[in-house]
Amino acid sequence: MVWNVPPLETPDAAADLDALERTGSVRLFVARARATNREFALDADTAPAVATLCRRLDGIPLALELAATRVRALGVHGLVARLDDRFRLLATGHRGAPPRQRTLHAMIGWSWDLLTGPERLALRRLAVHAGGCTLPAAEAVCGADDLPAADVLDLLARLVDRSLVTVTHTADGPRYRLLESVAAYCVERVHEAGEFESLRRRHRRYYTDLAEEAERHLYGHEQRRWLRRLDAETANLRAALDGAVAGRDPEGGLRLVNAMTWYWFLRGRLAEAKRSSASVLALTAETAGVTAKTTGITETADVTAGVPDTTRVPALRARALAWQAGIAFLHGDTTDRAAMLLYEDIDDPGERARAQWFLAFTGMGAGDPAASEKLLDGALAAFGLLDDQWGTAAALVTRAKHAHIRADPAALERDSERASELFGAIGDRWGQLQATEWLGGLAEMTGDYERADRLHRDGLHLAEELGLWPEVAVRLAWIGWIALQRGDHIRAREWCERAARLAAEQGHQAGQVFAETVLAYAARREGALDLAETHLRNVLRWTPRREDGETDHLVHLPMILVELGFVFEERGDAATALATHLESFTTAREFDAFRDMARALEGLAGALSLAGEQDHAAQLLGAAASARLATAMPLAPAERGDVDRITARTRDALGEDGFTSSFERGGDLTPEEARSLVDRVTVP
């Protein structure tokens, strides 16, 4: 009698030592390992390797028993290192056992021999998938002239019954997966049959089509569902892209990169986006202008529909270059300003407008706000002509960010509200997050901290629900910033420590900059000047430098410099404080960032007051107060401490009447006129 012995339970990746000891596959392996090596123990050193071993051997009892016999010679870490050659590794078993139980290869081969011809076809063709597949994928890849696609479902059911294929039921339907050892065996059979390349092309064609279908749904109400689907197919999509590069298929690679970049962006996988676009664009550079014959791709009769049409490559490449430039901006690479014009070579008007917007969106912090706004205006006009509601909303929310930088509350409210309405009608949750962010920014700017906190917390919950982890990091930082403005430095630090960790895990530089900035502000207000400077220096290290060595003026730079200037002032270093605040003012002026200009004027007042230039200091305080009043930007509690300190020192030196007179004179000055006062004094 033959008994079907199913695989044992395998441990989760996050399982701790106690959980491992309760897992069936781990218990079997440890017991057999101890039988051959009494010194073996499951402890903090061996546990991660044992867990990996059990997962990669899929909990197959015979495989675990065979692996346990090798522990004495190789150790568990050595076993894991050699699992890619598992059939050679596990080639010797118990001599008294039946032949089919002596090696892992023999065990799987015995099961293979019991299959019918169609079952073998389906099983070996499933092996081309990475990380499992859905029924439609199995039908598309396994089905051929010798195996009708309509028969695949019945064959899968039989293979599941034989424990050669596992099935899990998800919200998107059943998902089939070969055990890793079975997949390795089937890959051998695929190569024996001579169909590896044709199967890989079928696989690539299916997942390229899937990625392009998914991209269309990532800009609307089905965004969450399609994010989940692409998450599940990550391994297959990577395999398809790797296959396009290895097979020298420029069109296929470009189609995949263009379809996947928005997904990578939403998920925060910027390194993957950068790496993938670079490999595909390098391939297109090598094959530019060649015919399909010279691309190195040859198709068999059953996949002639997959022959690359190289006439599409230039247009696809233009779009990929624009995506690549935007991703580079997000990585902090602002050295190639000409990249902001790459959208011009895209022939499709809709794709060209969206590329134009993406470059404006990602490049707005690249030190050239005028160029970004020009791109944005052009994209917005194109979206209007195309009746592209998503594009219009995206352009408006980006324009709202510009308004926040300039401290223009009216424009910020107008564009954020309209973008929120459009994204709400479309059902795009990422877009709703963006609009909510700048409505929260408006509330913070105008001193409505309760509403700002509520909006950013709502955004945090939505981002967590969608699994948009870069957005989660930004929302955590925003909540920390609001806590700071309210004077709650402890909560600000707690929120932003979480934000910094998550942003670092995601490789999300903007989130890291935001979180580290808030941590610096909190540290200085708690009297930890050295810690504050460390945080600020960290942010400055992330600020790119041009070939001439000068720092690019990114939008966050003025607030970093002004805070650093206050650090120097509190240490009693008037000259360095003055120079740092001057640089902050100059940078803020380049962005028309009036809020930052007002803050820099307050910093300059502090530096001059410290140096004994009280009359000029009082005038600068007056000019800063006037600028805040004109733009409806009240002092936050977190800012008032600095202004009160500087005011008290200046008033004490000038007396009430002298201070009031100088303050009022300063109130009549423009920020530029106030800044020019600094040129009239010398600070030692």
Image: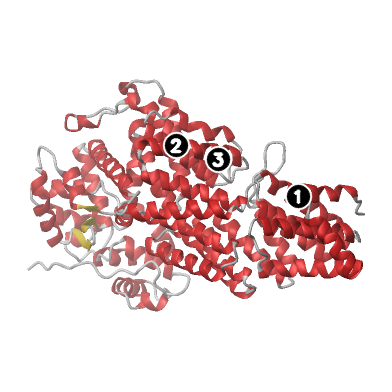
Q: Amino acid at mark 1?
A: Thr
Residue on which the image places disc 2 = 381
Disc 2 packing (10 Å; few <14; some 14–19; many ≥20): some
Classed neighbour count for the residue bearing mark 3: other residues with Cα under 10 Å, few (<14), some (14–19), many (≥20): many
Say which quarter of the image contains residue 49: bottom left
Q: Residue at x 23, y 56 (%)?
A: 177
In this rendering, the answer to whether 499 lies above or below 336 is below
Q: Residue at x 20, y 66 (%)?
A: 96
Name the quarter where the C terminus is drawn: bottom right
Locate the N terminus by quadrant.
bottom left
Residue 532: percent from the left, percent from the top? 71, 64
Disc sitting over residue 436 in the figure:
none
> Label 2 is placed on what type of residue?
Ala
* Residue hosting label 1: 670
Residue bearing mark 3: 373
Mark 2 or mark 3, earlier in chain: 3
Mark sitting earlier along the chain (1/2): 2
Residue 216, image x and y in percent? Answer: 31, 45
* Residue 365 shows in this picture: yes
Which sits earlier in the primary sequence, circle 3 or circle 1? 3
Q: Label 3 to label 1, Cα distance in Å? A: 25 Å
| Secondary structure type for disc 2 | helix
